[in-house]
Every structure is written in structure tokens, then in C-alpha cells.
Image (cartoon, rainbow, N blue to C red):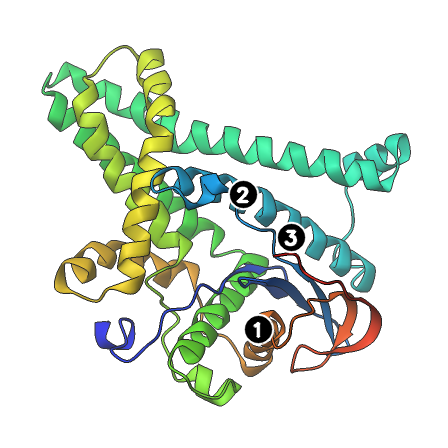
């Protein structure tokens, strides 16, 4: 791994960031958010809308980490469900709704069903995360109390177990064909952001020359969370199982806040300390990103171009777009942004 190709000396960090989705990418800019999905006939389905203004809480150090994490979880789930709907419409044989989704739609209607399913998805994601990455590691590590009562060693062992479980989980899902495709789009997103931050023309050829690894990736955020958790938990002793789980949930906002600040610092600095701290997350990105092809890079480039604010008006748009992220077919509604 050549860190000079990741922490690029002349790069100008941008606030634009994205998320890989099923057969596409969501890109969020300061004023506009765009979702682009590759259709079977090669066209690009795109949806653009104004980026919600950040609340005062989303600007406060430490607190903003928690606010942005929750917002990203909700938005990420919403975007994934949106991409699934688009793919279901255009790939009816490959992407079919399960019986539960169909039952909910029949009972409450499509719009309400979408909201209900989104809430259930977010709750399920949180429950699974707590169960797999918090309860399981501390339960497994509890066995070691028969060998040692050293609080530091027990918390360190719990942290190592949590990281190993996370790595095994990522490695396992990366073997799934659909997830492997998503990880290709993840790589395309990173390459395109690198290309943009280095002031090069946004073309697949230019973007392909960069690494798929990026210092501000959400994968690195998750690694920071797990590492900082070890340090914070070390001050909390080793109580009973349920007290451990409860205490770890209580300090999770603090850990998320600290991790977010560390990630932002890593994104705008390239000193040796930042590089060392970023290494675990960068190595993990080798699992969560794959080399994209030119068609996937075109999707990433189209979303970046779509979120760039070329004028005062920000369009709501949903339809077919070209490679420049400009509407070709669909409805466009313009509005005057407020100050």
C-alpha cells in the first residue's frame, strides 16, 4: 500500500461524499444530493434533491458525530430501499419483493408501507449491530474471567474479539455476488472523489488511475469506533454481562463523537500520526472496495457532476440523466433556496 497515493499531497479535500448502493451510487454535496442507478439498457436513472440543511446540533464538536451517524443510517437505509424499488421495476426477474413486503403494501398502501419498512430496517440494523458487535464479543470474552481478572486485559480481549467478528462479517458478505458489485461501486466512488479533489477532469480514465482507498471512508469510521471503544471501556471496569452491555450502550454516543472528530482530522491532514491511525481502516477498505469498471466509474462521475452547484437554483429531478448528470427524460421542479 502506497500511502502517498491515498494522502495525496496537492489534494484539496471536499465535503462531497457518497454511498454505494445496488447498481449505483448516492452522492451528497453541500447543496444537492444525487442518486444514480444503472439500468439494464445502459441508461442512468437519476434522482436529485436539495441536501437538507444541517441543524445546529450537526455542527457541534462531538455531538455532530452522533447526529451525522444517525442521519446517515436513516438516509442510507432510505436510499438502499429506493434503489431496490428501481431495480425491481427494471429487473423484475432478479429483484422480487418478498411475501412480507407485499403483505404490508396490501394492508396499508405503498407509501405507508415504504415508511414502515424503512423504520423496521433501521431498527433491525441497530438491533443486529448491538447483538453481533456488542453483546456477542462481551459474552465470548466473559469466559476469560476464569483465567484473569485484569480489567485492562479483559477489555482489550473484548475489543480484539469485536474487531475480528467485524472483519469476518465483512469478509463473508464480500463473497456474495450482489455485495461484490456494491463494493465495486464503493471503489468507483472513492476513485472519483480522489480525481475531483486533485483537480483533474472527471473522466473514467483519470479516475481509474487512483486507489479505491480513501481516508474519510465510513469503513475507517467504524474502525475508529472499535479502537476508541477499547480505551473508553477500560475505564468502566468489568461488571456483570447486562451491566456491561448497558454501560457500553450509554457511552456509545461519546465513542461515536470522538471517532467522527478523528475521522475529520484524518481527512484533512496527512502527518505521520494520522497515517498510522488510518492504517487499520485503510486495510479494511481492501475488503469493502473492489476495482470498478468504466461503466461504474461513469455512474460515480455523473453523481459528482450532478451535486455540483452550478447556479442558484437546485432542481428536484427524477428520471433519465446523461453522463454529465443532466436531465434527459423526467420531471424537473426548480425552487429558490432560502438563505
Q: Quadrant of the C terminus?
A: bottom right
**Residue 279: horizontal and vertical position, in percent?**
23, 59
Residue under label 1, please give it.
308
Q: Which mark is residue 79?
A: 3
Q: Which mark is residue 71?
A: 2
Left or right: where 120 falls relative to 266: right
Please name the residue shown 44% across and 83% down the image. Answer: 208
- Kind of element beneath mark 3: helix
Left or right: where 281 falls relative to 236: right
**Residue 118: horizontal and vertical position, in percent?**
68, 39
State the image quarter where residue 100 is shown: top right
- Kind of element beneath mark 1: loop
C-alpha gap between disc 1 and disc 3:
20 Å
> Which mark sits nearer the N-terminus, 1 or 3?
3
| Other-residue count near label 1 (Cα within 10 Å), few / some / many at <14 / 14–19 / ≥20 | some
Please name the residue shown 69% across and 49% down the image. Answer: 81
Please name the residue shown 23% across and 76% down the image. Answer: 4
- Kind of element beneath mark 2: helix
C-alpha gap between disc 1 and disc 2:
21 Å
Left or right: where 123 falls relative to 165: right
In the rendered view, tell whether residue 88 sits above or below residue 97: below
Q: Which mark is residue 336?
A: none
Q: Nearer the viewer, residue 61 or 72?
A: 61
Name the outermost residue toward the front: 339
Amino acid at each position: 500500500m502506497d500511502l502517498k497515493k491515498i494522502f495525496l499531497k496537492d489534494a484539496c479535500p471536499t465535503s462531497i461524499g457518497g454511498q454505494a448502493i445496488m447498481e449505483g451510487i448516492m452522492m451528497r454535496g453541500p447543496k444537492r444530493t444525487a442518486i444514480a442507478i444503472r439500468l439494464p439498457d445502459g441508461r442512468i436513472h437519476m434522482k436529485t434533491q436539495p441536501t437538507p440543511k444541517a441543524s445546529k446540533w450537526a455542527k457541534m464538536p462531538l455531538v455532530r458525530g452522533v447526529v451525522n451517524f444517525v442521519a446517515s443510517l436513516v438516509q442510507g437505509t432510505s436510499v438502499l430501499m429506493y434503489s431496490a424499488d428501481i431495480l425491481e421495476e427494471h429487473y423484475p426477474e432478479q429483484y422480487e419483493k418478498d411475501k412480507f413486503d407485499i403483505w404490508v403494501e396490501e394492508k396499508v398502501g405503498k407509501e405507508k408501507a415504504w415508511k414502515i419498512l424503512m423504520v423496521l430496517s433501521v431498527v433491525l440494523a441497530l438491533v443486529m449491530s448491538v447483538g453481533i458487535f456488542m453483546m456477542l464479543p462481551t459474552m465470548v470474552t466473559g469466559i476469560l474471567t476464569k483465567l484473569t481478572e485484569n480489567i485492562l486485559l479483559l477489555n482489550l480481549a473484548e475489543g480484539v474479539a469485536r474487531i475480528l467478528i467485524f472483519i469476518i462479517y465483512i469478509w463473508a458478505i464480500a463473497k456474495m455476488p450482489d455485495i461484490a458489485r456494491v463494493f465495486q461501486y464503493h471503489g468507483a466512488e472513492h476513485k472519483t472523489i480522489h480525481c475531483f479533489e486533485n483537480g483533474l477532469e472527471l473522466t473514467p480514465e483519470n479516475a481509474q488511475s487512483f486507489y479505491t482507498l480513501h481516508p474519510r471512508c465510513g469503513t475507517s469510521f467504524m474502525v475508529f469506533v472499535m479502537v476508541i471503544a477499547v480505551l473508553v471501556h477500560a475505564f468502566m471496569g468489568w461488571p456483570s454481562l447486562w451491566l456491561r452491555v448497558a454501560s457500553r450502550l450509554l457511552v456509545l454516543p461519546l465513542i461515536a463523537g470522538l471517532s467522527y472528530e478523528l475521522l475529520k482530522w484524518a481527512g484533512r491532514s496527512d502527518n505521520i500520526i494520522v497515517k498510522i491511525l488510518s492504517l487499520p481502516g485503510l486495510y479494511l477498505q481492501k475488503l469493502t472496495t473492489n476495482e470498478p469498471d468504466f461503466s461504474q466509474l461513469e455512474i460515480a462521475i455523473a453523481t459528482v457532476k450532478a451535486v455540483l452547484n452550478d447556479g442558484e437554483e437546485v432542481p428536484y429531478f427524477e428520471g433519465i440523466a446523461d453522463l454529465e448528470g443532466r436531465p434527459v427524460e423526467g420531471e424537473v421542479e426548480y425552487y429558490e433556496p432560502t438563505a
